Image (tube, helix red, strand yellow):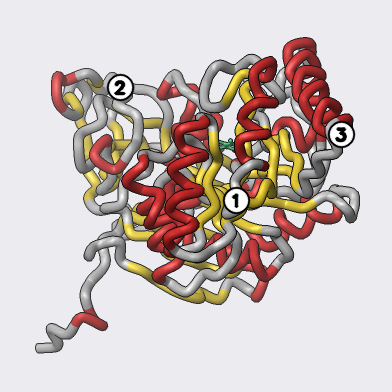
Amino acid sequence: MNLIPDNFPLRPAWTEIDLGRLRRNIQLIRADLPRRVRLMAVVKDEAYGHGALDVARVAMEEGAWGLGLSTLEEAMSLRDAGITAPLLLLGERQQAELEWCVAHDLTVCVNESYNVRALARVAAQFNKRVPVHVKIHTGMSRYGVRWDEALPLIESVLAEKTLLLEGAMTHFAQSDETDKRFANLQFSRFNDVLNAMVRRNVSVPLRHACNSGGFLDLPRAHLDMVRVGILLYGVFPSTVCRRIPGIEPVMSVKARVAAIQTLKPGEVVGYGMRYTASAPRRVAVLPIGYGDGFPRVRNEGGALIRGKRAPLIGGIAMDALMVDITDIPQAQMWDEAVIMGRQGNEEISARDIAKLKNSVTYDVLTNWRLRLRRKSINAQDGAVEANETAAVK
Ligand SMILES: *Cc1c(COP(=O)(O)O)cnc(C)c1O
């Protein structure tokens, strides 16, 4: 008997994160950017499902200025793991969060003058001068002070001795579509605010507006820094935005064949009997289901086995899906199947799965559930597996 944690048998369904590709993507992004423009790596929501700590380490090694996050918990877990880089919390903070932010040197965006005053008071209590980024909404109507009301907020920051105006930022509602009219309008509104600041002799070292779409398609809006999320992970934000050759998807989702069934004509597959064999069929059962984040489809999509496409048949269950392997006679028990990613010359992209979900690639990447263990590999170093982390805690 060898029941020690090191020997814990991991589930035959997992996400594979290729940190070598991540590194290469970041290098390509940096090489594409003018030297003076900094890169913020956006690692919110566990780095879009890729594992925030691993991604943060690679991004900082590759020269990112800092990391963009969404929640206090996300930022705290990076600090607790020893990440000392600037961490910018996007969005708005509750007042109760401010002292945690100041204590752990997390940089916040300010959208409201009452939070400026509250942050200044907390900074004074900690005897710190705290950098802030003013968030300016230029048409998206999400976070931020309206562009035509931004100056008083900026002045309220400047008036606080314990605050330092480090950044001014906005966010595009549509940067990755062919029609750039609204993005251009937003950028001109942002520029109006920046110009008004120049006229008042207010300097702000980090002006930033671009997400991945803006980085790719709006070079005149790069300013001092770009905030890149999805492109780090090798997924282009849309089908029409500019392409950078060599950028490759970082995440794959895999499972091993856990049962094989042989069907006679007229036999059915899965809940609701949504598939009936019209001829003899061979079916592989993969131990991954909607409980892992696969869309709840019926007779749509599929997996790659032995380099070939195996169509999904019947309805997907919480923990299993069935694929037709009649045309892949070599397929055997425990063969590796690719649910998302490449095998041989075939690929199932995040976009293919997004279509099944009637959603976007962002949603696909972030919605693989944590009961899929996350396995880090570094294929650049000759397919050496670097690190295996069971997501089970
Ligand atoms: C998520 C986010 C980004 C990154 O967007 P991508 O399209 O993934 O590059 C940039 N800025 C803000 C404010 C965000 O919330």
Image-quarter location of ligand 1: top right
Write down the residue under mark 3. 198
Q: Secondary structure at mark 1?
A: strand
Residue placed under numbered mark 2 in the picture: 298
Report the residue at 61% width, 66% height from top.
58
Relative to 322, is 356 above or below?
above
Instruction: Report the residue at 45% width, 67% height from top.
Output: 79
Residue of label 1: 163
Residue 209 location, x and y as percent?
72, 34
Image mark for residue 21: none
Q: Secondary structure under badge 2? A: loop
Looking at the rendered structure, the number of numbered marks drawn on it comes to 3
Q: CA distance from mark 3 to mark 2?
A: 58 Å
Residue type at numbered disc 1: Leu
- Left or right: 274 as drawn, with respect to 153: left
Q: Quadrant of residue 202?
A: top right
24 lies left or right of 87:
right
Q: CA distance from mark 1 to mark 2?
A: 55 Å
* Residue depicted at 20% across the width and 42% down the height: 319
